[in-house]
Image: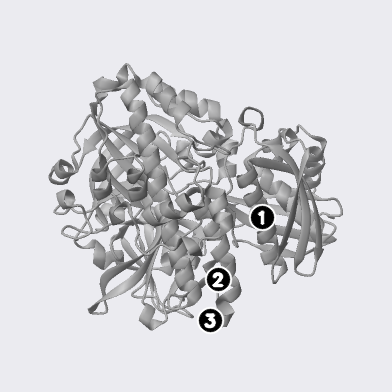
């Protein structure tokens, strides 16, 4: 029987340690799961057919930003994506978890219709309302080597919660 | 999965007895080896589906079932609208009407050997595939709605195919009762540039050779013999379907409580069939089915153009086109009466038995073709619906191999370049914009499709007709 437990993804594999943030993340991960999460970071976790994305941050908004970065890394190496055009995003939902799914789904919509990839995010959350900005650039297949398109953010393993000293925001995305 | 949790009904039929909130039992089809290898999540998800209102007979899982979203992938469930039955966006999935189309070519292996590389290159150059790719067709608002109502019939009307193609597509290529007005502007926007695109992930276009015939009596009416070359296209409703799934998952999750529906998992979000929201989803989902039909029809047109340039002697009529992410209204015998049921198939293929009126006349006596796509480098299969399939799982069969390892694990184990080189040594040409995508889709990242197909055959879900092996694979 296969293990059902979400597993850490070995993020360095995707990024080939090509940016310093990745090194920070990998160093943090070696210390184990329950590390202090004052510093934003993200990771992937396994789903049998698809990919789990998980963000950690000092605030809920920061965890949402990191989850978005994790989603970008499902598609391509964020280090290859220049944050040179901004897209404003607004969405709302009746609770934190649906708001996370909505945020990621809005990004998926913007990526699909603008044919862009995003590598930097800023989020503010006020109750059930999110206002955010995503920075990125148009997809260039030869440079970004996109592996797969994300169809939608699911409600599988969907969780937004306080972690030891910050927040965690995660879900599985359908690819 | 722990088989001690199951009651073995027969060699290939395993029951999760009704318990707790379950309204019916769950039934999983597969060999003991497949069941043991199956994720325990399938047990949980099949049990959860069995708890949904109005479910009839049982919640089923096919031999390729794996951990999905709410419903297991490889899940089948039928709901009776007169018993409070529901329709679930999660039970259909994000890629509405994802499916497989198989085209004859009239060619045999020796005809293409000398042209394999040029054919692979031409297909890769002219079939839009992969992240960010766009088709050549742009639809204005009026044409978008016409496409959503007309499906492949619309595409043929626009010159992208022939009238006889429509006979070989489920619903004659035209899903009735589609409601473009129920499709959000966002979903239509997402589709604007995506007509005639393959997508990415496990979607592909392959040129394959028939390498084995298991049932000569069925292969003959299907027009298949050893050595024949066919083309198989696996893709769905593209951005439009994905957005419809997203839109209605949210709306159903929020509205569930107002319908008095308790969801053990929010991904099971659903609405009564007899509700405005349920009706709206059905109208939008049917529009997405038409989008998938139209998309595969346009891809077929492109394939025919390419063959006309590279191998002009080829003729490419359809063998069949069948989807594996749908909810369809079908007449089935349940509880002693024949009723109209809303059959959800999420990663499961419809498999009508011989004589069913919805099967094309030329194939009707044989049973509906069931097209099982492999992964790059692995075999694909053609099966046929059986007389007993209706009693097994409302005329349903498997849809593919199912993943054996996550995308992560595949990335750790394989290099895309190595996979391409290894397959080239076996005479299989891979063309893809993404080496990482190829690593994630490595053949060995999937379960043994042969074991899945054998189990479907042994369980009576569908009968094995032919094995197909790839020569060219264009991967998104």
Asked whether, in this view, residue B405 is left or right of residue B98, the answer is right
**Residue neighbourhood size for the residue with mark 1, other residues' Cα within 10 Å, grouped as few (<14), some (14–19), many (≥20):** some
Residue at (36% x, 21% y) in the render: B116
> Which residue position is annotated with label 2?
B252
**Quarter residue B365 falls in:** bottom left
**Quarter residue B75 falls in:** bottom left
Residue at (23% x, 59% y) in the render: B358
Instruction: Name which of mark 3 and mark 2 comes first in the sequence.
Output: 2
Q: x, y (%) of residue B249?
A: 56, 65
Q: Are marks 2 and 1 in contact (CB under 8 Å)?
A: no
Q: Secondary structure at mark 3?
A: helix
**C-alpha distance separating marks 3 and 2:** 10 Å
- Number of residue marks: 3
Asked whether, in this view, residue B427 is left or right of residue A126, the answer is left
Q: Pointer 1 indicates a residue of which chain? A: A
Toward the viewer: A146 or B74? A146
Q: Secondary structure at mark 2?
A: helix
Asked whether, in this view, residue B408 is left or right of residue B172, the answer is right
> Which residue position is annotated with label 1?
A106
**Residue neighbourhood size for the residue with mark 2, other residues' Cα within 10 Å, grouped as few (<14), some (14–19), many (≥20):** many
Evaluate whether residue B185 shows in this view. yes
- Per the rendering, the mark at residue B259 is 3
Evaluate whether residue A4 shows in this view. no
Q: Nearer the viewer, mark 1 or mark 3?
A: 1
B185 w.r.t. A20: above or below: below
Asked whether, in this view, residue B441 is left or right of residue A28, the answer is left
């Amino acid at each position: 029987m296969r293990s059902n437990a979400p597993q850490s993804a070995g993020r360095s594999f995707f990024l080939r340690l090509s940016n310093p943030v990745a090194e920070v993340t990998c160093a943090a991960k070696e210390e184990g799961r329950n590390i202090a999460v004052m510093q934003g970071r993200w990771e992937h976790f396994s789903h049998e057919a698809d990919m789990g994305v998980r963000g950690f941050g000092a605030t809920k908004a920061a965890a949402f930003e990191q989850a978005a970065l994790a989603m970008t890394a499902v598609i391509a190496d964020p280090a290859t994506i220049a944050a040179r055009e901004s897209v404003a995003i607004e969405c709302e939902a009746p609770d934190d978890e649906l708001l996370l799914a909505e945020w990621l789904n809005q990004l998926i919509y913007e990526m699909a219709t603008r044919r862009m990839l995003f590598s930097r995010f800023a989020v503010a959350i006020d109750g059930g309302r999110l206002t955010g900005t995503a920075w990125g650039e148009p997809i260039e297949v030869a440079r970004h080597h996109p592996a797969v398109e994300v169809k939608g953010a699911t409600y599988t393993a969907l969780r937004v919660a306080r972690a030891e000293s910050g927040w965690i925001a995660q879900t599985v995305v359908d690819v | 999965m722990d088989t001690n949790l199951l009651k073995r009904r027969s060699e290939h039929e395993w029951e999760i007895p009704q318990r707790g909130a379950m309204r019916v039992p769950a039934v999983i089809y597969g060999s003991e080896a497949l069941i043991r290898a199956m994720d325990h999540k399938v047990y949980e998800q099949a049990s959860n589906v069995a708890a949904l209102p109005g479910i009839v007979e049982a919640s089923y899982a096919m031999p390729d079932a794996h951990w999905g979203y709410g419903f297991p992938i490889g899940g089948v469930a039928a709901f009776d609208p007169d018993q409070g039955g529901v329709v679930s966006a999660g039970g259909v999935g994000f890629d509405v009407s994802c499916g497989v189309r198989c085209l004859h070519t009239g060619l045999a292996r020796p005809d293409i050997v000398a042209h394999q590389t040029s054919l692979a290159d031409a297909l890769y150059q002219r079939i839009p595939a992969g992240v960010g790719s766009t088709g050549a067709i742009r639809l204005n608002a009026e044409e978008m709605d016409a496409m959503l109502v007309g499906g492949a019939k619309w595409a043929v009307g626009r010159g992208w195919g022939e009238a006889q193609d429509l006979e070989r597509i489920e619903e004659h290529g035209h899903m009735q009762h589609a409601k473009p007005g129920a499709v959000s502007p966002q979903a239509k926007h997402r589709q604007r540039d995506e007509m005639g695109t393959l997508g990415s992930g496990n979607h592909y276009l392959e040129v394959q050779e028939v390498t084995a015939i298991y049932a000569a009596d069925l292969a003959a009416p299907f027009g298949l013999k050893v050595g024949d070359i066919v083309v198989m296209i696996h893709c769905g409703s593209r951005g439009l379907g994905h957005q419809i799934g997203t839109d209605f998952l949210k709306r159903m999750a929020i509205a569930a409580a107002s319908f008095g529906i308790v969801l053990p998992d929010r991904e099971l979000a659903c609405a009564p069939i007899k509700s405005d929201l349920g009706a709206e989803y059905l109208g939008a989902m049917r529009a997405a089915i038409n989008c998938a039909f139209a998309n595969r029809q346009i891809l077929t047109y492109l394939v025919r153009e390419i063959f006309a340039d590279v191998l002009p002697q080829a003729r490419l009529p359809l063998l069949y086109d069948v989807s594996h992410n749908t909810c369809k209204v079908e007449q089935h015998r349940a509880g002693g009466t024949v009723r109209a049921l809303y059959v959800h198939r999420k990663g499961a293929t419809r498999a009508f038995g011989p004589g069913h009126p919805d099967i094309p006349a030329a194939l009707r006596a044989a049973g509906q073709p069931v097209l099982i796509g492999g992964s790059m480098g692995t075999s694909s299969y053609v099966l046929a619906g059986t007389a007993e399939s209706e009693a097994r799982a409302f005329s349903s069969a498997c849809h593919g191999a199912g993943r054996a390892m996550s995308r992560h694990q595949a990335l750790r184990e394989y290099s895309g370049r190595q996979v391409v080189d290894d397959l080239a040594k076996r005479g299989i040409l891979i063309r893809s914009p993404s080496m990482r995508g190829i690593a994630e889709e490595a053949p060995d990242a999937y379960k043994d499709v042969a074991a899945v197909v054998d189990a479907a055959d042994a369980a009576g879900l569908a009968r094995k007709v032919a094995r197909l092996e790839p020569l060219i694979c264009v991967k998104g």
